[in-house]
Image (cartoon, rainbow, N blue to C red):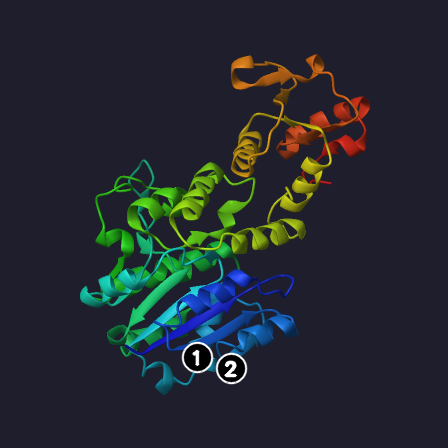
Amino acid sequence: MNRLGIVVLYDAEGILDRYVEALLSSLQDEIQEYVILINGYLEDESVGRLKRYTTKIYIRENLGFDAGAYKDAFLKFIPRNIWKSYDEIVLMNDTFFGPVISMKEVWKLFESDHVDFWGITRHPRQKLSDGSIVVESHIQSYFLVIKSRLITSRYFLEFWERLSYPLTYQEAVRNFEIEFSVFFESKGFCGKSLMDLKEGIALGEKTENPCFYSYELLKEYQVPFLKKKFLNLESPIYANMMDALEYIEKKTDYNTKLIWESLFRLSKEKRNWSVFSYEKLEKFYLGHTRIYIYGAGKYGKNLQRYFQYRRWDYECFLVSEHADEFSNCVNFKDVNITLVDGIILALGRKAFEEVYPVLRREVSEAQLMIPDYM
């Protein structure tokens, strides 16, 4: 099997994290050649490390997200006779960690199955209450494998030629990720996901993005990848992601230090990835004798789950009113905060703007860790 991997990378600071190298190394037995497309900029040292895997590295304007990069790969960077010569082409980006488990069985599953393109997860069709379709069922595109029958068809080139460079993330999802499955299935090609081949277990009735159930995907479907964007402390599925990380550490050989290196860097750099910095959080925790978490809502519960993962202690949740001792919540007015104590404001913007001025009258600035709203 002769495979080409087209890899799209983007980093606002132009830095290549080590988890990307681990991904490329892990797939080298299955992917014979890489072409790497860098959206925007990558520092020289990082480009040098990529040259261990290929000399075919193209730096392009950050136009059209991954979809625009793939379009340029097929229409500008790779000659048509070259990309048509491969048995399979793998499209992938750097939005996930892994593979956390071996992919050998995954490749075998799709070698024996009659399929023209495949991926790891399938987003289910979503409908409104009136029956109108909001999202068509589709293979998610962070890891997408395309077989020869589709590659050499006239429809493949047609798809890329008619694709406009997306101007927004939502447009990229609609016109590339969703449309890829819809368009090619309408032309008679068969697309499947790893989830489809194991249909009926765990997530059979779910209608949300399957990546919201990362722990279940890993445990029940043996999905080898973990999406990066859900690992910030504002994530609505943070607890599930922590369950997945703990499973990886207990049941696999994947080095999760690679994950945390990237997360610490991302949350440190102010680029709308998270309003809570893992690095600042660690320094704050180590710099105070007792820690209180102000707020017992989504952010507070996510912070509690991170503390549990790190085996850190905290005194209790602090709230402005409606203290509930059974939920380990105490009214701020009823707690004696000393000079060696620290308070983490785990609050959304609106609540933060109400609470922060009150706390500043009661404790010093050094005793507060605040989200990056200011």
Image mark for residue 55: 2
Q: Secondary structure at mark 2?
A: loop
Provide the residue designation for mark 1: 75
Q: Amino acid at mark 1?
A: Leu
- Residue at the image position 42 percent from the left and 65 percent from the top: 92
For the image, the number of numbered tags is 2
Graded by Cα atoms within 10 Å as few (under 14), some (14 to 19) or many (20 or more), the crowding at tag 1 reads some
Q: Position of residue 360 (x, y in %)?
A: 79, 27
| Looking at the image, residue 338 lies above or below residue 160 | above
Are dots 2 and 1 in contact, CB under 8 Å?
no
- Name the one closer to the observer, 166 or 76: 76
Which percent across, then down, holds residue 208? 36, 42
Tag 2: amino acid: Thr
Q: Is residue 271 above or below residue 145?
A: above
**In which quadrant of the rendered image does the N terminus lie?**
bottom left
Residue at 31% over, 51% down: 222
| Mark found first going from the N terminus, 2 or 1 | 2
Specify whether 16 is left or right of 135: right
- Residue 119 percent location from the top left of the image: 32, 60
